[in-house]
Image (spheres, grey):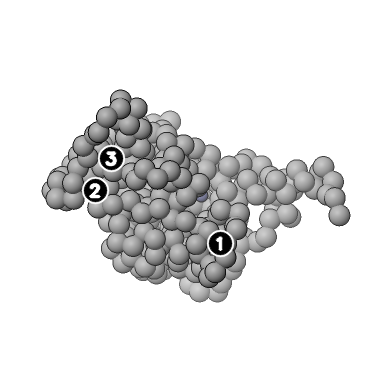
């Protein structure tokens, strides 16, 4: 049965809100959007306000630097409970305030959602935290510079020292290969636990994975380092395309150089973090 213009508008708006695109659209969406899954499980506890501020800043930094736009999200593992993580309700990252942060569990349930709409792709974060105890923060982005490397046969390589973490290799998650047998034709979104687990398996022990025709996930042992890696993965993609356009062979960091340079990055990444955070919270 064909749907009416009004119904279509509301369904479209609901989908965009869930993706974090339309943070301001509110009126009929609540009635059109499935309520967030609920639980009676208690919260792992109130976190320090400075961590919420850092998470808000992380989203704004990533928007400022072109990694996120109306889409994408960043999360941090709960400091008191490794089976919980903190991420905003479904909202464009530049609009997030501390009051929008929701505690999630690893099944994607919003422990403190109180009926607020959650991101459809929260399972990206949940399943990476489940699979990778070393990961303390996750960024999911759709930056345009990343997409060509997710769909072409040219692998992403580490072009310079700031992106040395890419020298470990950059796997590409192929969502069509998440079923058994015939290619799985999905809507491209990692919107359930099974797809999240498949993405986490593709990521393996690497810090970054591209997602074919979609974007990327970048992880880190801290929120500042995850942001650092997200920023320099995006920069690296543009630089690699420029190197290719120059023609002829180009040389990238090998694994040993990458490991050595990344040890330095883990120390010096605090410097840009302080600058980026100050700028992000100033507006
Ligand atoms: Zn996405």
Give the x, y percent position of residue 155. 34, 45
Quadrant of the frame with the N terminus: bottom right
Q: Is residue 12 left or right of residue 275?
A: right
As measured in the structure, the alpha-carbon distance from the residue carrying label 2 to the one carrying label 1 is: 30 Å
Q: Residues within 10 Å of mark 1 (few under 14, many from 20)?
A: few
Instruction: Give the structural element (helix, strand or loop) at label 2.
Output: helix
Instruction: Give the structural element (helix, strand or loop) at label 1.
Output: loop
Which badge, 2 or 1, is on the more N-terminal residue?
2
Residue bearing the label numbered 3: 273
**Residue nearer the viewer, 111 or 222:** 222
Q: Give me the disc on residue 183.
A: 1
Give the x, y percent position of residue 35. 65, 61
Q: Residues within 10 Å of mark 2 (few under 14, many from 20)?
A: many
Give the x, y percent position of residue 115. 62, 60
* Residue at point 61%, 62% (across, down): 36
Residue bearing the label numbered 2: 167
Q: Is residue 117 left or right of residue 132?
A: right
Q: Kindly report which numbered mark, 2 or 3, lies closer to the viewer in this rendering.
A: 2
Q: Is residue 9 above or below residue 118?
A: above
Do tag 2 and tag 1 residues touch (Cβ < 8 Å)? no
* Residue 96 visible here: no
* Residue at point 60%, 58% (across, down): 185
Do tag 2 and tag 3 residues touch (Cβ < 8 Å)? no
* Residue 151 visible here: yes
| The quarter of the displayed image where residue 116 is located | bottom right
Give the x, y percent position of residue 169. 28, 52
Quadrant of the frame with the C terminus: top left
Q: Residues within 10 Å of mark 3 (few under 14, many from 20)?
A: many
Instruction: Give the structural element (helix, strand or loop) at label 3.
Output: helix
């Amino acid at each position: 049965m064909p749907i009416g213009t009004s119904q279509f508008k509301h369904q479209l708006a609901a989908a965009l809100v869930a993706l974090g695109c339309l943070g301001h659209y509110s009126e009929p969406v609540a009635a059109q959007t499935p309520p967030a899954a609920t639980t009676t499980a208690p919260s792992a506890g109130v976190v320090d306000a400075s961590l919420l501020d850092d998470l808000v800043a992380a989203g704004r930094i990533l928007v400022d630097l072109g990694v996120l736009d109306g889409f994408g999200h960043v999360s941090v593992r709960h400091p008191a409970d490794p089976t919980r993580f903190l991420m905003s309700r479904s909202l464009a990252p530049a609009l997030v305030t501390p009051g929008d942060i929701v505690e999630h569990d690893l099944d994607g349930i919003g422990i403190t959602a109180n009926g607020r709409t959650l991101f459809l792709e929260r399972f990206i974060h949940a399943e990476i935290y489940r699979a990778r105890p070393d990961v303390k923060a996750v960024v999911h982005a759709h930056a345009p510079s990343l997409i060509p490397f997710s769909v072409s046969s040219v692998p992403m390589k580490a072009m310079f020292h700031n992106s040395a973490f890419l020298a470990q290799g950059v796997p590409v998650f192929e969502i069509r290969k998440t079923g058994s047998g015939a290619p799985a034709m999905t809507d491209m979104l990692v919107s359930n636990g099974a797809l999240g687990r498949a993405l986490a398996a593709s990521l393996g022990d690497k810090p970054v994975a591209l997602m074919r025709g979609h974007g990327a996930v970048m992880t880190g042992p801290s929120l500042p380092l995850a942001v650092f890696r997200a920023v320099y993965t995006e920069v690296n993609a543009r630089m690699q395309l420029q190197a290719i356009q120059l023609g002829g062979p180009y040389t990238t960091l090998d694994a040993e150089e990458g490991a050595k340079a990344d040890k330095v990055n883990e120390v010096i990444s605090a410097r840009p973090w302080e600058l980026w955070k100050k700028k992000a919270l100033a507006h």
